[in-house]
Image (spheres, rainbow, N blue to C red):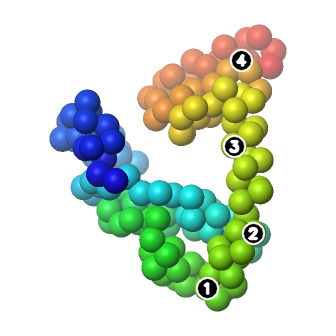
C-alpha cells in the first residue's frame, strides 16, 4: 500500500527532509520510501536470523533495504537476497517461512507488547515502567532515564 494513501495527513516531503537531516548526524541515509510494506515475513525471517546468530546484522540489513534503498521488505526475493548476503541458509529459511515456524514467537511478542500498552513502533520500555514512543530526540531519552534513576529504578 502507498504510504500517501495509508497516511494522507502526513507531509511526506517535510517528514523526509527532517529524517534526512537527523539521520545524517548518525550516518543514516534515508531514501524515498513510498510503500508501506507488509513486514510480517521479514519479522519471521528476523527470528530465523536470531536463531542463527545473525539477528543484528539481518535487522540492520532490513532497515537499510527499506529506509535507504526503498525496497519492499515484504517480498520474498528481498528477504532471501539479504539472508544470502549474510550467509544464512536460504533453503532452510524458505522452509521455515512456509511452515510458519516463527508465528507463535511473534504472537508472544505482540501479546507482551499489548500488556505494556504498546501500540506503536518503535517503543522503548524503561525498567518496565516508563516508555518512550517513537523516534524521540536523545534529550528526551536522557530525561526519562534520569527520572527513573532518581526514583531508584
Picture coordinates of residue 128, whole percent (x, y): 77, 27
Front residue of this view, candidates 117 and 49: 117
Q: State the residue position of label 3.
A: 110
Which numbered mark, 4 or 1, is in the foreground of this view? 1
- In the picture, the quarter occupied by the C terminus is top right
| Residue 150 in sight in this render | yes
Which numbered mark, 4 or 3, is in the foreground of this view? 3
Q: State the residue position of label 4.
A: 148
97 sits to left or right of 6? right
Q: State the residue position of label 2.
A: 101
Quote the CA–CA distance across marks 3 and 2: 16 Å
Q: State the residue position of label 1.
A: 90
Disc nearer the start of the sequence (4/1): 1
Disc nearer the start of the sequence (3/2): 2
Residue beneath the point at 75% across and 69% down: 101
Q: Are marks 1 and 3 in contact (CB under 8 Å)?
A: no
Amino acid at each position: 500500500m502507498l504510504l500517501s494513501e495509508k497516511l494522507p495527513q502526513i507531509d511526506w516531503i517535510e517528514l523526509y527532509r527532517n529524517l534526512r537531516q537527523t539521520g545524517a548526524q548518525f550516518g543514516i541515509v534515508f531514501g524515498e520510501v513510498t510503500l508501506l510494506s507488509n513486514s510480517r515475513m521479514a519479522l519471521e525471517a528476523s527470528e530465523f536470523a536470531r536463531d542463527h546468530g545473525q539477528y543484528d546484522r539481518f535487522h540492520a540489513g532490513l532497515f537499510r533495504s527499506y529506509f535507504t534503498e526503498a525496497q519492499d521488505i515484504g517480498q520474498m526475493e528481498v528477504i532471501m537476497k539479504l539472508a544470502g548476503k549474510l550467509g544464512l541458509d536460504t533453503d532452510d529459511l524458505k522452509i521455515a517461512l512456509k511452515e510458519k515456524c516463527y508465528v507463535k514467537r511473534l504472537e508472544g511478542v505482540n501479546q507482551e507488547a499489548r500488556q505494556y500498552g504498546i501500540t506503536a513502533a518503535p517503543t522503548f520500555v524503561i525498567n518496565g515502567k516508563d516508555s518512550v514512543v517513537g523516534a524521540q530526540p536523545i534529550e528526551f531519552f536522557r530525561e526519562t532515564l534520569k527520572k527513573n534513576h532518581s526514583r531508584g529504578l
